[in-house]
Amino acid sequence: MDFTLSPEQQAVQEKARGLAQEVKLLAARYDREAAFPREILQPWAEAGMFGLALPREYGGRGLNYVAYVLAQMELAQACPASALILHLNHSLFGGTVARFGTVDQKQAWLPRVAQGEVYACFALTEPEAGSDPAGMKTSARREADGWVLTGQKNFVTSGSEARFALVAAVTDPERGAKGISALVVDISATPEITWGSREDKLGLRAAVSVPLYFDQARLPGISLLGEANQGLKVMLTALDAARVGSAAIAVGLGRAVLAEALAYARQRRQFGQAVTDFQATQWKLADMATGLEAAALLTLKAAWLKDQLRPYSQAAAMAKKFATDTAMAAATEGVQILGGYGYLTEYPLERYFRDAKAGQIYEGTNEIMRLIIARELLRG
Ligand SMILES: Cc1cc2nc3c(=O)[nH]c(=O)nc-3n(C[C@H](O)[C@H](O)[C@H](O)COP(=O)(O)OP(=O)(O)OC[C@H]3O[C@@H](n4cnc5c(N)ncnc54)[C@H](O)[C@@H]3O)c2cc1C
């Protein structure tokens, strides 16, 4: 087994590390103001980060998913919320259109999303359908020249900023989970789509989330992504890929926590010695470093399986569950290592602590990750 990165992967990693360093100090302000962080995202777009593993012919860089997760492990160290916005463009929307779209659809929707010129969002969750998306109520009716979409989606991250939305809707109510279709909506061309006020979130506050409302929204025929009534498969495939990226964001967040905690503990003196001299602190740091290394390896393995076109649902669920749980544990101990100062907004630890919690919930909660892992185990 060879753990050496290719020169291209190393170059992407180094570039992302530099980009993260440049914007690190902006993240706290965007979190405080719960404002969409264009200033952070702009240089990432200019450097090609939004299209790393998207096809070259549609504005991407044509690299593999391993390169993408390596980049996210760096970018998320600066601002996990911005990393999530990029992730929506790149993986939940871009990767799904690249996989299921026709040539016309890819030409229409991908290039500007892959270059970070416009934003994209993913609308699956509803007020009464979260972990069980098959219970959704949003519906789309076929008309001669397209579709009419009606309903509401909740928690749509980037929804108020996005040009394009990937939306799941019931198209054949008789067929349950096999009567759902995936539709791509050009929000700017659809006046019947509106959004509510931004959710006042605990963390990832710069990754603004809103409810989206569809009031008999008229969509052109090109909007259907994949086959009619196969939309749940499209959305769940999108989530498989996305979970690998979310695991990478969690690894990046955890590494940022470790770096901050280590730097603080080295210079903080109590009882006449550095806090790092206490074995209790050393053990916390050692546990964090071990967990993060394991999380990174699970994430890279899932990305590698995806690149090899091998089954990777279970690997993605394991990576997402383990990495986000590890990031949460690291953030909890990180705050502890800083003592009272970890609890102040003057230091970034409390922000990482709030951001980490979301990873255990979005893109399927970690309880649902266990269901996926167990389902594969029981299948034998
Ligand atoms: C920061 C953030 C950003 C988000 N962004 C988006 C977005 O862009 N697009 C989008 O569509 N959604 C988004 N979501 C929504 C997210 O995907 C859902 O919150 C998540 O899937 C859980 O759904 P729910 O909140 O309805 O919880 P519920 O499904 O109501 O779950 C409640 C509790 O029950 C548990 N539970 C449910 N079913 C089972 C089961 N079968 N076995 C065991 N336990 C179970 C859950 O794990 C959870 O603990 C976002 C959420 C957050 C927090």
Image (cartoon, rainbow, N blue to C red):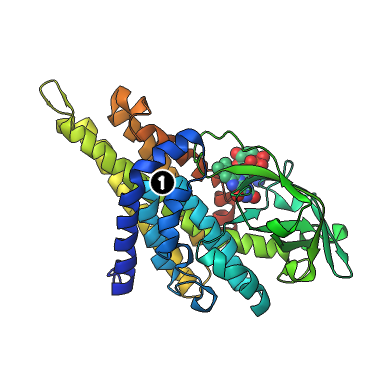
Residue 323 location (% of width, % of height): 42, 50
Q: Is residue 193 left or right of residue 123?
A: right
Q: Is residue 224 left or right of residue 22?
A: right
Quadrant in which the C terminus is drawn:
bottom right
- The residue wearing badge 1 is 79
Residue 373 location (% of width, % of height): 54, 56
Residue 285 location (% of width, % of height): 26, 40
Residue 193 location (% of width, % of height): 75, 51
The one nearer the camera, 377 or 65, is: 65
- Residue 183 occupies quadrant: bottom right
Q: Is residue 302 left or right of residue 209?
A: left
The one nearer the camera, 1 or 376, is: 1
Residue 6 seen: no
Q: Amino acid at mark 1?
A: Cys
- Indicate if the residue with disc 1 has its beta carbon within 8 Å of ligand 1: no
The one nearer the camera, 123 or 295, is: 123
Counting other residues with Cα less than 10 Å from the Cα at mark 1, is it few (<14), some (14-19), or many (20 or more)? many
Q: Residue furthest top?
A: 271
Q: Is residue 340 left or right of residue 358?
A: left
Residue ID at (62%, 38%): 198
- Residue 24 occupies quadrant: top left
- Residue 69 occupies quadrant: bottom left
Q: Is residue 81 above or below residue 57?
A: above
Residue 339 seen: yes
Residue ID at (33%, 32%): 347
- Quadrant for ligand 1 reads top right
Quadrant in which the N terminus is drawn:
bottom left
